[in-house]
C-alpha cells in the first residue's frame, strides 16, 4: 500500500527528516539519528532547540493562562514584554503591537505607515522577502515562485535595487551610491515623496542571499526618508535578536529606524511577532484600525521574555560575534582556491557562501544543491540555500552554537566542497 499523506504538499522541503526532539543545535529523528541543525528552523531557534529557560517559562505559563485576547482583557506579561522590548530596541522605539508571524507584522507595519502618513505607496528592494500574505507577497522580490499564480497582487509597491557589493565588482561604496541614486530616481519618476508612506528594508537580505547593506547606504536612505517625511521601516524579522552579533542589525550602522518589524528569534520557536515604533507614532494609529485574535499570546510572551533573558546574559552577544568570526574565517579558508566560490559574506551568525560557475560567472544552483545533499547525507549537517537562484548556502545556527559544533560543520562542509568540485 502506498503511504498516503494527509499533509499539504505545498511546502517545499529542505529535507525529508521527521524529528522527534531537539536540544541546542542538535535534532534527533524518529529513527534515532542525530543531525546538526545549522538552519535554526530558518533563523528562529535563537536560544537553540528547547532551551531549558524557555521550556520552563512556556510550561509555567501554560498552567496559568493560555489565551488572553487583548481586546477583551490584558494578561500580566503583555506590558512586561513591551517594556523589555523598549529596553533592547534602538531609540526611540518604545511601543509595541504584537502579532504571530513575520508576514503579519510586516503587513501591519505597512498599515501603520499608511495610517500615520496618509500616503498610499511603499518602496521595497530587489531580493527582498517580507512574507506570504497578498501584501507581503507583493513586497517580496527574491523569487517569482512566491508570487506566480497569485495575481493580481496589491498595488502601490515600488522596487529599488538592493546594494550588493558583489554586483559592483566587490565595491560596497559604488553599490551604495548607485542604489541611493536609484531610490532618488524612483521618487522622481514613479512614487512622489508625497505619495510614499514608507521604505521597507532588510538591513541584511535574508532569503535574498544574506547580503549585508553597506552602512553608507542605510544611513543615506534614512536621511532621504527624514528629508521627505517617509518612514524608514527596518524588517528585522531575520536579522533581529542577536543574529548579527548585535540585538538588531541596524545597530551596526548607527541608523535609527522609525519602525521595526520583529519575529523569528523573538520567541525561540514559539510563534510571536511585533511591530515597534516610537510612542507618538503608535499613538497616531487609529484605535480599532488594526488588531487580531492571537497577538500577544501569553505563552508567546513568556517564551519571548525568557528568550530575552538568555540573549541579554553577560557576554552572550560577544560570543555570537566570536562564533560568527570563527565560522566565516573557517569558510574563507575552506573555500580559498575553489574557483566556484564567488564570495563569503558574514555579519555575526548570518553567514553565506555564494557559488558562481567559474566559466560563465552565472549562479551555480547545481553545485549548491549537490553540497547541501552531501552535507546532509554524509555529515548529518542541515544547511539551506538562499538567493534568487538558490546560488548561496546560508549558515544560521542557533546562537548558542559551540566552537566544537562550528568546527564540525566546517569539516563536513569542506568534504562536501571537495566531493562536488
Ligand atoms: C526578513 C523577513 N521578513 C518577513 C518574513 C516572513 O515571516 P513569516 O514566515 O513568519 O511570516 C521572513 C521569513 O522568512 C523574513 O525572513
Image: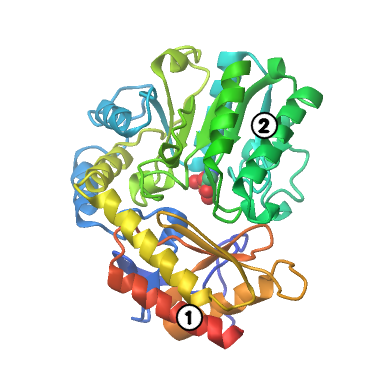
Q: Give left or right: position of 59 versus 39.
A: left
The kind of secondary structure element at disc 1 is helix
Position above or below: 77 against 404? above
Whichever of labels 1 and 2 marks the residue nearer the N terminus, that label is: 2
Q: Residues within 10 Å of mark 1 (few under 14, many from 20)?
A: some
Where in the figure is residue 192, as x and y percent of width and height? 74, 20
Q: Marks 1/2: CA distance? A: 40 Å
What secondary structure is marked by label 2? strand
Residue 291 makes an appearance in the image: yes
Query: Does the rendering let one see residue 27?
Result: no
Mark 2 surroundings: few (<14), some (14-19) or many (≥20) residues within 10 A: many
Q: Closer to us: mark 1 or mark 2?
A: 1
Question: Which part of the image, by quadrant, shows the C terminus?
Answer: bottom right
x 32%, y 72%: residue:
405
Q: Quadrant of residue 85?
A: top left
Number of numbered labels in the structure image: 2
Q: Is residue 345 left or right of residue 30?
A: right
Q: Tell which of 307 and 415 is nearer to you.
A: 415
Q: Write the residue at 62% across / 60% down.
A: 10
Q: Name the image colouring.
A: rainbow
Quickly name the residue at label 1: 414
* Nearer to us in this view, 41 or 350: 350
The image shows residue 353, relative to residue 275, as above or below, that is below
Mark number, residue 236: none
The residue labelled by disc 2 is 123
Give the side of residue 43 with respect to residue 183, left or right: left
Q: Which image quadrant is residue 401 in?
A: bottom left
Amino acid at each position: 500500500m502506498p503511504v498516503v499523506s494527509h499533509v499539504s504538499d505545498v511546502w517545499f522541503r529542505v529535507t525529508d527528516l521527521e524529528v522527534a526532539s531537539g536540544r541546542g543545535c542538535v535534532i534527533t529523528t524518529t529513527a534515532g539519528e542525530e543531525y546538526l541543525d545549522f538552519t535554526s528552523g530558518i533563523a528562529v531557534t535563537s536560544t537553540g532547540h528547547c532551551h531549558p529557560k524557555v521550556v520552563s517559562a512556556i510550561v509555567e505559563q501554560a498552567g496559568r493562562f493560555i489565551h488572553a485576547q487583548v481586546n477583551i482583557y490584558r494578561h500580566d506579561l503583555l506590558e512586561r514584554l513591551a517594556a523589555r522590548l523598549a529596553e533592547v530596541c534602538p531609540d526611540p522605539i518604545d511601543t509595541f503591537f504584537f502579532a504571530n508571524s513575520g508576514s503579519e507584522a510586516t503587513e501591519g507595519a505597512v498599515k501603520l505607515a499608511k495610517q500615520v502618513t496618509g500616503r498610499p505607496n511603499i518602496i521595497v528592494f530587489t531580493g527582498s522577502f517580507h512574507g506570504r500574505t497578498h501584501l507581503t507577497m507583493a513586497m517580496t522580490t527574491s523569487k517569482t515562485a512566491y508570487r506566480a499564480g497569485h495575481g493580481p497582487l496589491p498595488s502601490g509597491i515600488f522596487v529599488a535595487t538592493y546594494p550588493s557589493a558583489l554586483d559592483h565588482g566587490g565595491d560596497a561604496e559604488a553599490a551604495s551610491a548607485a542604489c541611493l541614486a536609484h531610490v532618488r530616481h524612483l521618487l522622481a519618476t514613479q512614487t512622489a515623496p508625497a505619495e510614499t508612506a514608507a521604505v521597507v528594508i532588510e538591513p541584511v537580505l535574508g532569503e535574498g542571499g544574506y547580503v549585508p547593506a553597506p552602512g553608507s547606504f542605510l544611513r543615506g536612505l534614512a536621511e532621504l526618508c527624514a528629508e521627505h517625511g517617509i518612514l524608514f521601516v527596518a524588517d528585522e524579522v531575520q536579522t533581529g535578536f542577536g543574529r548579527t552579533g548585535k540585538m538588531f542589525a541596524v545597530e551596526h550602522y548607527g541608523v535609527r529606524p522609525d519602525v521595526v518589524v520583529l519575529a523569528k528569534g523573538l520567541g525561540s520557536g514559539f510563534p510571536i511577532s511585533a511591530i515597534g515604533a516610537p510612542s507618538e507614532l503608535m499613538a497616531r494609529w487609529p484605535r480599532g484600525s488594526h488588531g487580531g485574535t492571537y497577538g500577544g499570546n501569553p505563552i508567546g510572551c513568556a517564551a519571548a521574555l525568557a528568550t530575552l533573558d538568555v540573549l541579554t546574559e553577560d557576554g552572550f552577544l560577544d560570543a555570537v560575534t566570536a562564533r560568527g568570526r570563527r565560522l566565516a574565517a573557517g569558510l574563507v579558508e575552506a573555500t580559498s582556491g575553489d574557483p566556484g566560490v564567488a564570495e563569503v559574506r558574514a555579519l555575526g551568525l548570518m553567514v553565506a557562501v555564494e557559488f558562481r560557475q567559474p566559466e560563465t560567472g552565472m549562479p551555480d544552483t547545481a553545485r549548491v544543491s549537490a553540497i547541501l545533499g552531501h552535507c546532509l547525507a554524509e555529515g548529518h549537517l542541515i544547511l539551506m540555500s538562499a538567493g534568487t537562484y538558490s546560488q548561496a548556502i546560508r549558515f544560521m545556527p542557533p546562537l548558542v552554537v559551540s566552537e566544537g559544533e562550528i568546527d564540525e560543520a566546517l569539516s563536513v562542509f569542506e568534504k562536501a566542497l571537495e566531493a562536488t568540485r
